[in-house]
Amino acid sequence: MAKDRSEIIEKLTKKYEAIGQDVDVHLQGLLQAKPLTYWDYIQTDALLNLQIQRTDQPDEMVFIMYHQVNELLFKMILWEIDQISENNTPTAEFFASRLMRISRYFDMLTSSFEIMGDGMEVGQYMKFRNTLTPASGFQSAQYRLIEFASTELINLIDNRFRATIDRDTPFEHAYEHLYWQAAGKNYDTGDKTTLLRLFQERYMEDFLVFMKKYNTSNLSSIYKSLPQKDRLNLDLQNSLRHYDHTVNVQWVIAHLNAAKKYLESGEEVAEATGGSEWQKYMHPKFQKRIFFTYLWTEEELNTWGVANLDGHNVLKEPLNV
Ligand code: HEM
């Protein structure tokens, strides 16, 4: 024990010497330091003070907190994507295991979406939602970052404009043709709804920087840069497919069903708070966003968001990518 302690002291001395610090002062500091508590470490007071309602409807609290849980999970996902993209030579095992972490988070988001669909009284929702216009979950920046970090930009471009965009297209031009501009942009006049304009004013610069950063280090590009034996790794291919399908079909359908439940609850179909033509805009078969197109068969691509892949989603043999 005594030997271990002197070793530790020696290492500490060296560590602080290296940064020009006196180790004795730091050891004295230890004598004064308060013991760590759970609440200080996890920052529970700060976290639990972030739920501010705009109405007296109790279920608005469910809505706020569930969105906050989503944002925390989005952050966990971005954290893991960053670990993969910062690793210059990821092995197939590392890549697959980190992807499964990411998928577990997104699976949580998808399987818990009933908290929105079934977990609020329709009458209460229809009251408090009126105080939220023109805001919408559409304006979640982290959701967009996850997309930029997952695939090549071309896969996020509106289907109608893909042919006009290539590697030499400026990022600003690509930004204007991202699939989600369709929620609020009039392509004839260039006009944008308030939802889109405010989102752009707050985040466009950040998005452009992020798009450039992930242009070649997104998950799809990293996968393509692996040696062929790793690209043919069955677990890795299945992890990528699972992630793609969870984000771009399962979550999208769960989200659309929740929206339908509320917005179609009255005699007339309600307008979305963000003002999109939501019934058309939100369906995966129209958006056709797919992160790893080369990992799906022609038929799977053609029936994206329509066919029920449950149970048939797992490859038995790797695709020759
Ligand atoms: C009752 C619950 C919800 C309803 C009724 C709903 C409704 C909508 C609608 C109608 C849109 C289309 C844009 C618009 O015009 O507003 C939208 C977009 C979006 N919402 Fe929700 N939403 C709900 C919950 C959530 C939750 C919990 C999240 C998680 C952060 C979320 C994230 C998003 C995102 C990321 C988009 C953009 C999707 C895309 O561009 O395809 N929503 N939502």
Image: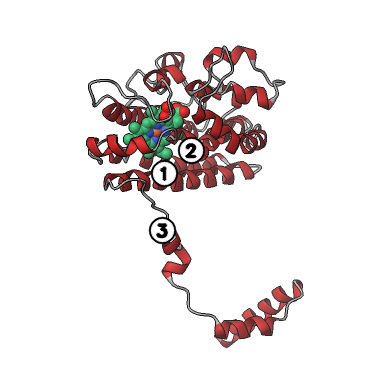
Residue 77 percent coordinates (x, y): 49, 43
Q: Is mark 1 within 8 Å of ligand 1?
A: yes
Mark-to-mark CA distance, 3 and 2: 20 Å
Labelled pair 1, 2 in contact (Cβ < 8 Å): yes
Horizontally, residue 88 falls left or right of residue 118, namely right
Q: Earlier in the sequence, mark 1 or mark 2?
A: 1
x, y percentage for residue 19?
Answer: 75, 71
**Foreground pick, 242 / 180:** 180
From the viewer's perspective, is residue 263 above or below residue 93? Answer: above
- Residue in the picture at 52% in, 37% down: 146
Q: Secondary structure at mark 1?
A: helix
Q: Amino acid at mark 2?
A: Ser
Q: Does the Cβ of the disc 2 residue fall within 8 Å of ligand 1? A: yes
Q: Nearer the viewer, mark 3 or mark 2?
A: 3
Q: Which mark is residue 70?
A: 1
User: Which of the two labelled residues, at mark 3 and mark 2, occupies the earlier sequence position?
Assistant: 3
Q: Name the amino acid type tagged 3.
A: Asn
Residue indicated by mark 2: 140
In the shown orientation, is residue 254 left or right of residue 201? left
**Foreground: 79 or 228?**
79
